[in-house]
Amino acid sequence: MTQTFAAFAASLALALALPAPAPAGPAEDARDLARISNYLNATETLEGNFVQVDPGGVVSEGDFYMRRPGRLRFEYAPPNPTLVIADGFWVAVIDARDGVADRVPLSETPLYLLLKENVDLRREGAVTRIERGDNQLAVTAGDPSGEVQGDITMVFSNNPLELRQWIVTDAEGKATTVALRDMRANVRIEPSQFVIENAPRDN
C-alpha cells in the first residue's frame, strides 16, 4: 500500500465522518435522489482503482470493474489473495491461491441496491439517510423488507455528480469502506471478467 493511496482512503473516510450541514427539505432530497438514480442508470460500466479499509483497519488496493446490472469484479493486489466476482446472481469471494470460493446470492447483499437494473431511490423506500457537505452527497440505503441485513452508504461528489466511495455495514455493525479513483465510465469490459467458474445457477 502506497502512502498516497492510504492517505486518499483516509481522507474520504474522514470527510464522511464530519458533521453534515442542517438537513435539506423533502423537495431537495427528492431532487438529489432523482439525480443519483439517473446517474446510476446511465452508468452501464465503470472501471478503475480502489482502496479498501476492512472492519479491522486493514488496507488493501487493486482494480475494479463494474457492469450494471449485477456484475462486479474486484482484483486485489498482492499480498491480498482475494478475488471478488458478482455475476448477476451470485457474489463469490475467491481465494486465488486455491480457487476456493464462498458464494451468496447478490440479492441478499447491500450491493444489490447499487447494481440492480433499474434504480429509483425515491420510490423504493430504501433510503434511510441523506447527508451533504464539502461538495459531497452521501446516501444510506437498506432493504425495506428487512430480508437483507446491513446497509450501504454511497458517497458521491456533488458537482459533477460521480460515485466516489461506498461503505457496506453488515448486520453486526462492522463497516467496510471502498474508495474509488481513476475511474472510466461506459467503456467496454469483457463479459468473461464476471464469470464465476463452476457457479451454480437458479433454475
Image (tube, rainbow, N blue to C red):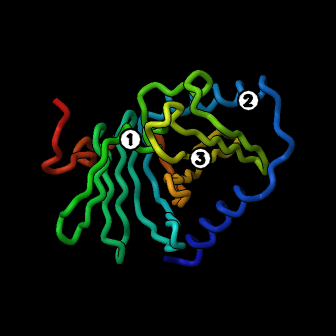
Separation of residues labelled 2 and 1 (CA atoms): 27 Å
Q: Which residue is mark 2?
A: 29
Q: Secondary structure at mark 2?
A: helix
Q: Are marks 2 and 1 in contact (CB under 8 Å)?
A: no
Residue 91 visible in the snapshot: yes
**Residue 125 horizontal/vertical position (percent):** 59, 27
Residue at the image point whose x is 13% and y is 49% from the top: 198
Q: Quick check: can you spot residue 186?
A: no
Image height check: is 64 above or below 30? below
Kind of residue sitting beneath label 1:
Glu
Residue 39 lies left or right of residue 96; in this view the side is right
The number of numbered discs placed on residues in the rendered structure image is 3
Question: What residue is shown at x 21% (from left), y 49% (from top)?
Answer: 196
Which SS class for mark 3?
strand
Dot 2 or dot 3, earlier in sequence: 2
Frontmost of labels 2 and 1 is 1
Number of residues whose C-alpha sits closer than 10 Å to that of mark 3, classed few (under 14), some (14–19) or many (20 or more): many
Q: Earlier in the sequence, mark 2 or mark 1?
A: 2
Give me the disc on residue 133. Answer: none
Q: Where does the C terminus fall, quadrant-wise?
A: top left
In the image, which is nearer the foreground, mark 1 or mark 3?
A: 1
First of labels 1, 3 by sequence position = 1
Q: CA distance from mark 1 to mark 3?
A: 16 Å
Image coords of residue 94 (percent x, y): 26, 61
